[in-house]
Image (tube, helix red, strand yellow):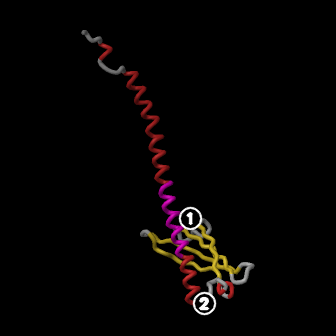
Amino acid sequence: MQLKRDDFGFTLIEVMVALAVVAVALPALLLTISQQLDGMRDLEDRSHAQWVAANRLVELRLVSTARGKLQTGLIAGTQELAGRDWYWWSEGKETGVPGFFRYEILVSDQEDGRMTPLYSLDGYLVHGAAQDGE
């Protein structure tokens, strides 16, 4: 069998078309991977902020049990979690129901992040005569 000259490989045009396809597809793939990594990092930050807020609500519950009264007003603080400092703000207000208090807990990874928190948690605690009925 005798081979023709055209049977040995790709033509220059075929190679150029293949390179053009790769040149278009590769940046799109890299952009998608970058967005996925950013999304994963954001989800991890929000999960940590959620843990900080839940820890703060439990701390409020423990302090109210130990002291016999609930903390009200705005309280700010920090907590270290996963090697980072997290900033939290908790504000307690009495609701229309006697003995029920509403707490809003905001968590951010920035010291001035109260206006743009990563996570916000609303919790309710019972104190006084309402707690005795449990």
Q: Which residue lies furthest to the top in this view?
A: 2
Q: Nearer the viewer, mark 1 or mark 2?
A: 2
On residue 36, the disc is: none
Residue 51 inside the magenta-drawn segment: yes
Residue at 56% in and 70% down: 107
On the image, the x and y values in percent for residue 10 come to 34, 21
**At x 44% / y 44%, what residue is drawn?**
30
Q: In which quarter of the image is residue 5?
A: top left
| Residue under pointer 1 | 118
- Compared to residue 98, the image places residue 113 above or below, namely above
For the C terminus, the quadrant is bottom right
Question: Which numbered dot is residue 68?
Answer: 2
Mark sitting earlier along the chain (1/2):
2
Mark 2 neighbour class, 10 Å CA radius: few under 14, some 14 to 19, many 20 or more: few
Q: Which residue is drawn at 72% across and 78% down?
A: 95
The amino acid type of the residue labelled 2 equals Gly
User: Is 6 within the magenta?
Assistant: no
Nearer the observer, 3 or 110 = 3
* Residue range highlighted in magenta: 39-55
34 and 57: which is toward the camera: 57
In percent of width and height, residue 117 lies at 58, 66
Residue 11: x percent and y percent?
Answer: 36, 20
Could you say whether the residue bearing mark 2 is in a helix, strand or loop?
loop
Kindly identify the amino acid type of the residue bearing the numbered disc 1: Leu
Q: Which residue lies furthest to the left in this view?
A: 1
| Residue 60 in picture, x, y percent from top left | 57, 81
Q: On screen, 65 above or below 58? A: below
- Residue furthest to the right: 96
